[in-house]
Amino acid sequence: MQAFWDQILDFSQTITTEVGAKLLAAFGGAHAEEKSDGSLVTEFDKWSDERLRTAIHDAFPDHGVLSEETTHVFPDTDWCWIIDPIDGTTNFTQGIPLWAVSLGLLYRGTPVFGYIYLPTLNQRFHGYWPGTSGLDLPIGAFLNDKPIQVRPDDPGKNQFFSLCARSTDVLKQSFPCKVRMLGVATYNLLIVAAGYAIGAVEATPKVWDIAGIWPIVHAAGATWISLDDKPPFPLTVGENYEKRPFPTLLLNRADLVEQFRPLVQVVVGDRSSKR
């Protein structure tokens, strides 16, 4: 089984390096179109999507694929990759050097491996987390191959908490941390796993925003709260995930949920008016 996971990691590093190199060459100069949900897409999102799907099919022909740009229905396969070809397309088109390529590998509907590459930062996150899968895999979370974990700190005015663009109503009340907004859903949550922030919230992430980071943040010791009380995983075979949001609160410690959930729960009630 270790050989399989070595293959998965090597494949993820190789294909994201290839895709990242082309995206870096186009960074800041891509023309974007607006999709029906108001988000942006470029020709490079589409190219990256196609390249990733083709590479997965060639390397793992029995694995399914679910993608932001093309296939949104979860397939009837034991193994499925969920890909986000460019997370942070708006940053990518506007020349802001913070965007990512995201891969998540699911076993029977639950992510067990994730790989996130931020080419402009030369940061590569990956992690393994079996959850309830029963798989024998090397549990751990890593940034550039070095182990990472959440920081144990208490909230404070010099501690970071990350918001998304649809969660700014949180600031209509007193908030116990410094706020940051990054424009990249994966990185927004990964900074908790890396120990840079003690918490983060995403109001409307889609499955391709969270599948890759799910194993990483859990292996790093973070606490994941589904703000709509609907567990994200396992996914359901045959269901279309194009429009389903997964409002999420991520914290460095479970004992802080009681303090922070009431402060961020507003993002669930207000999310429909902010799309």
Image (tube, rainbow, N blue to C red):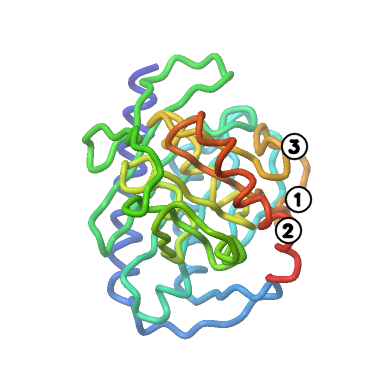
Check disc 3: other Cα within 10 Å, few if <14, some if 14-19, many if 20+.
Answer: few
Image location of residue 69, percent across then percent down: 59, 63
Indicate the amino acid at tag 1: Asn
Q: Which residue is the site of mark 3?
A: 237
Q: Secondary structure at mark 1?
A: loop
Check disc 2: other Cα within 10 Å, few if <14, some if 14-19, many if 20+.
Answer: few
Q: Are marks 1 and 2 in contact (CB under 8 Å)?
A: yes
Is residue 86 visible in the rendered image? The answer is no
Q: Residue furthest front?
A: 174
Q: Which residue is the site of mark 2?
A: 243
Image location of residue 239, percent across then percent down: 77, 44
Indicate the amino acid at tag 3: Val
User: For the point 72% across and 63% down, which residue is it?
Assistant: 270
Indicate the amino acid at tag 2: Lys
Judge by depth and name the residue closer to the eye, 72 or 175: 175
> Left or right: where does residue 256 sit relative to residue 19?
right
Give the distance between the C-alpha atoms of the residues marked 1 and 3, in whole angstroms. 9 Å
User: For the point 41% across and 19% down, which residue is it?
Assistant: 137
Judge by depth and name the residue closer to the eye, 235 or 218: 218
Q: Which residue is the site of mark 1?
A: 240
Q: Are marks 2 and 3 in contact (CB under 8 Å)?
A: no
Check disc 1: other Cα within 10 Å, few if <14, some if 14-19, many if 20+.
Answer: some
Relative to residue 90, is residue 245 depicted above or below? Answer: above
